[in-house]
Image: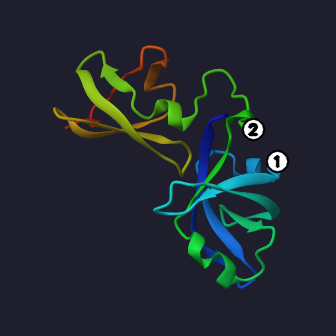
Amino acid sequence: MTEKIRIGQIINTHGIRGGLKVRTFTDDPERFYDLDTLYVEEPGKKQQEFHEIEKIQIHKGFVILYLKGFENINDVEHYKNAYLFIDESLMKTLEEDTYFIRDLIGLKVYSEEEGYLGILKDVLRGGSNEVYVIRGEQYGEVMIPAVGEFIKIVDLEKGEMHVELIEGMIE
């Protein structure tokens, strides 16, 4: 059985014809155009429903998703806050030195000067680049732009990331 990969979350309905507004977990929302099917897991349910995709649009940075068989807002209202999944086999291949967010979350983060900073807990998207959110006991929450100037080593096998900080990044 192949693993299912979470690719987005339905955050609202869109229009009256059954559209679903999706916050994507990818840096390339146009990737959704390549999909014909996906799985929906409603809040509080552990079972995922298989659906065929009728239509995809990108509107103001969000994916608008239409599922086959759902033609009005009343049919899809219950999907608010549901997560979207695809089979792992449908994941695209990444370029060198790029990573899936799911592989970065949980990495132990170290700085040469300060030592252990904490665990990478979140990746914020928006603006010109992503920002890694690290939480640890000694420094609390540390936010580091995900650019080569600060991210020196990502070792998924060891579960570590090594960063270079500049003044003001930690208090």
Q: Which residue is mark 1?
A: 34
Badge 2 vs badge 1, beta-carbon distance below 8 Å: yes
Labels 2, 1: front one:
2
Relative height, residue 65 to residue 8 (above, below):
below
Residue at 51% over, 25% down? 148
Q: Which residue is found at the position 57% from the left and 55% from the top?
A: 47
Splitting the image into 4 quarters, where does residue 5 fall?
top right
What colour scheme has been applied to the protein in the rendered image?
rainbow
Q: Amino acid at mark 2?
A: Leu
The answer to whether residue 94 is above or below residue 46 is above
* Picture coordinates of residue 52, whole percent (x, y): 80, 59
Residue 97 or residue 65, whichever sits in front: 65
Tell me where residue 116 appears, x and y as whole percent. Answer: 25, 22
Element under disc 2: helix
Q: Residue at x 78, y 53 (%)?
A: 37
On the image, numbered disc 2 is attached to which residue? Answer: 90
> What crowding class fits label 1: few (fewer than 14 Cα within 10 Å), some (14-19), or many (20 or more)?
few
- Percent across and percent down for residue 42 are 55, 63
Q: Amino acid at mark 1?
A: Asp
How far across and down, in percent of the image, does residue 169 sit? 29, 36
Is 159 on the left or on the right of 21, as rendered?
left
- Number of numbered discs overlaid on the protein picture: 2
- Answer with left or right where residue 144 lies relative to residue 98: left
Q: Quadrant of the C terminus?
A: top left
Report which quarter residue 26 is drawn in. Answer: top right
Q: Earlier in the sequence, mark 2 or mark 1?
A: 1
Q: Mark number for residue 167?
A: none
Left or right position of 166 against 28: left
